[in-house]
Amino acid sequence: MAITTSITRTTTIPSIAARQYTPSTRWIVSMMSYVTTVGLEEYVSKRAAHNSLERGTDTPKCHPETRQAIQENILSHIRDGKEKVLWLLGPVGAGKTAIMGSITEECYARRWLTGSFFISAATMKVDRCSKRYLIPTLAFHLLELNIPHLPAAILAAVAANPSTVDASKWPKVVLVNGVDECAADENWEYRTKHEHQELKEANYREVLSSLVKLTNDPSFPFRIIIASRPEHAIQGYFSSLPSDASTQVFLDDMYSPEDDVALYAQAMLTKIGRDYGLRGEWYNRIGPGKDDPCYLAQQSSGQFIYIATIIRYIQDQSGAPHKQLEHVLNCRPRNRSNPFTALDALYLGILKTSPDPELSAKWLHCIDGNTNLVNFAPASRALLQKPWYKRCILESCPGETEYLLGPLVSLIPSAVASIILQNVM
């Protein structure tokens, strides 16, 4: 649907704010008051939509028959949920982007999708990670919808002459993925690393506030699904909201991630076997046990990024699948040619956000239970495994845990983080 608009930087807001509006258009004015501040056309990111050419056909989505429970939970909330905002959170590599990709595709197929924005710092493109592009892009998606009278209502809101819109046949949901990847303001000189991080966190809060503000209008017709890591600033923002304003879905063991990882591993290893003419369960003749997919799932700790990295390594054609899988199963952390280089880079990048990465790495090693306790008595061994006790042992002064590990919440198992980072989570 071609729409010609005159929404530009020159549109002003004061006259809009001074008027009274019907409930069915106040949220449109709220959205457009941001859009007209920066201009619509200039700040639309066509690369951030779920079906953009840049994201392509190989964008992360859930493998068939995996993550079914979590997907149904989110879809049922979109259909019948009380809260207008749902926050999907989980650590690095838990599969948030794949879940959001599948949810977006399903909503698109059901005609539920209002708009989507997949934030990505990895693309190194401003329009994929700058806060300035989010609301204008979502507004543009609204303009593209074939909804009677909606384009006229949006333009009327900008022109301070709103009209009533029938929302009975509208779609249901807006999806925003990767708020934690929203970058600090470009073209800004940062004097310190701490200042840079503070400005990034301010942008997280601004993005979330812009989205949640829309839902404050009772006539706002959409649910908003937001996905991110449980970063300190984001967690703090959601904690500050009224209890009925949002709900949270955490990707934890309740959704049986290891079972899904094993299913995905088996399906992909079988596909690799077909591609190379390997018969049957070829992979089970290589590893230490009789069920390599289950073994790899156990090693993954429910992190899909672990098994996805393994599959990419086996598929990269630098060696025969048998040799590649054998390398994975025999891999040691100090092996320079190990298949987890990409995974290491991801975790290292997060680790460097700590004010003391080296000390933080040592703490994480201890917190994760990687301490030799063989020479300790059973009672002492059990005590040393308690997260609160580890905190007492590790801290040299009160607050040191939050100082060191606050930026690294997404690397710490959720059950441990809730105790270790009592003042953060």
Image (spheres, helix red, strand yellow):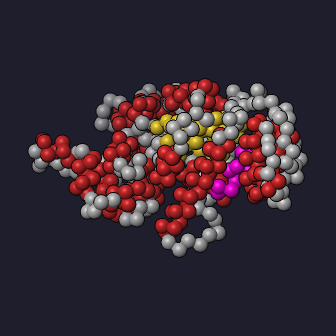
The image shows residue 198 at horizontal and vertical percentages of 52, 62
The image shows residue 125 at horizontal and vertical percentages of 65, 58
Q: Residue at x 79, y 44 (%)?
A: 20
Q: For this view, does 246 lie left or right of residue 29?
A: left
Q: Residue at x 26, y 57 (%)?
A: 394
What span is colored magenta in the figure? 130-139
User: Relative to the observer, which residue lies in front, 22 or 104?
Assistant: 22
The image shows residue 369 at horizontal and vertical percentages of 26, 47
Magenta stretch: helix, strand or loop mostly: helix
Q: Residue at x 79, y 51 (%)?
A: 18
Q: For this view, does 291 lie left or right of residue 213?
A: left
Residue 211 appearing in the image: yes
Picture layout, residue 22 above or below residue 407: above
**Membership of 136 in magenta stretch:** yes
Q: The N terminus appears in which quarter of the rendering?
A: top right
User: Relative to the observer, which residue lies in front, 284 or 26?
Assistant: 26
Q: Residue at x 51, y 37 (%)?
A: 243
Picture layout, residue 184 above or below residue 270: below
The quarter of the picture where residue 246 lies is: top right
Q: For this view, does 323 lie left or right of residue 22?
A: left
Picture layout, residue 302 above or below residue 193: above
Q: For this view, does 42 lie left or right of residue 214?
A: right
The image shows residue 178 at horizontal and vertical percentages of 57, 48
**Membership of 230 in magenta stretch:** no
